Amino acid sequence: MTALVVLVRGVHSLLEPQAYQDLMEDSLLQGLTFLVSFVSLLGTGFGFVLASFERMAKQMEEMASLDGMTGCLNRSTTDALLAHSLERGRRDGAPVAFALFDLDHFKLINDRHGHRAGDDALRAVVRVVKARLRGADVLGRMGGEEFGLILPGTDAPGAQRLVDDMRRSIEQLALRDDQGRALALTVSAGVAVAASNQKLGADRLFALADQALYRAKDAGRNCVMVWSEMPLPPARPEVDRA
């Protein structure tokens, strides 16, 4: 717009050069030209500032919802989306599966191969899992080496098949540390499913999946357990789940 105004002003100066002999001389077209140029520049500057603020707001929103190291959603965002998925599942008459999984003996991986190798292992696991998810599925890092997986519209057999496929793929990863030493990975997982006619809250479903994960650890690790197939113990003892 500013370029067009300058062009018009240039043409006008050729047609009426007497109007530009004195910059302070009154001229309707000259005044309008200055006004339009000023408004155009002001609008361009305002648009630039607004676009910059929008980009900053988007970046801050992403930083607040993502785990910086793995790129997954963080714990608080995952918890909120689990509650939302359960509400939608009840409304749509569809089950919602939730899986908790973590890397077996992750502390030993860090101790033997270094924390950098441990971080690389976590990122490799995330890549494997994300490659098998649908658009509606949600992967979040719950803390440390533990991850949560929200699977809307998925029953217990479907969730078990998916998570077990992920487990086998992770076991087959060929990773090496900085010194070229092989790094073996396995994961244990617990799955819990909320039927659409159940009034399970997000905290309760999380607790059931956590109990199933504890059973998977107790069963020898590197396996998937579904809570719906076993009774819930009254209280989980404190055990080493690394």
Image: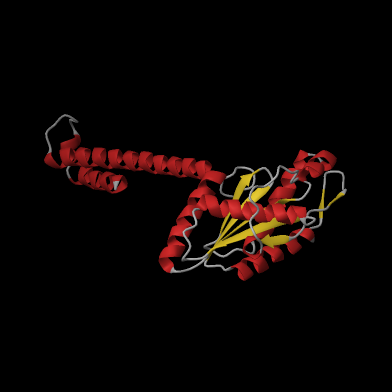
Residue at the image point whose x is 51% and y is 54% from the top: 82
- Residue 57, quarter of picture: top left
Residue at the image point whose x is 81% and y is 57% from the top: 174
- Residue 10, quarter of picture: top left
Give whichever of 214, 234 is nearer the camera: 234
Q: Is residue 185 above or below residue 76?
A: below
Q: Is residue 91 above or below residue 74?
A: below
Q: Where does the image place residue 17, in percent across and percent down from the top left?
A: 19, 40
- Residue 92, quarter of picture: bottom left
Whether residue 216 appears in this view of the structure is yes
Q: Describe residue 16's horizontal placement relative to residue 232 as left or right.
A: left
Whether residue 18 appears in this view of the structure is no
Give whichever of 179, 55 is nearer the camera: 179
Q: Describe residue 199's horizontal placement relative to residue 9 as left or right.
A: right
Residue at the image point whose x is 44% and y is 64% from the top: 90
Q: Where does the image place residue 227, in percent across and percent down from the top left?
A: 64, 60
Q: Where does the image place residue 3, in percent across and percent down from the top left?
A: 31, 46
Give whichever of 4, 67 is nearer the camera: 67
| The C terminus, quarter of image | top right
Residue at the image point whose x is 74% and y is 44% from the top: 239
Q: Where does the image place residue 28, in percent across and percent down from the top left?
A: 12, 40
Give whichever of 204, 9 is nearer the camera: 204
Q: Is residue 156 above or below residue 118?
A: below
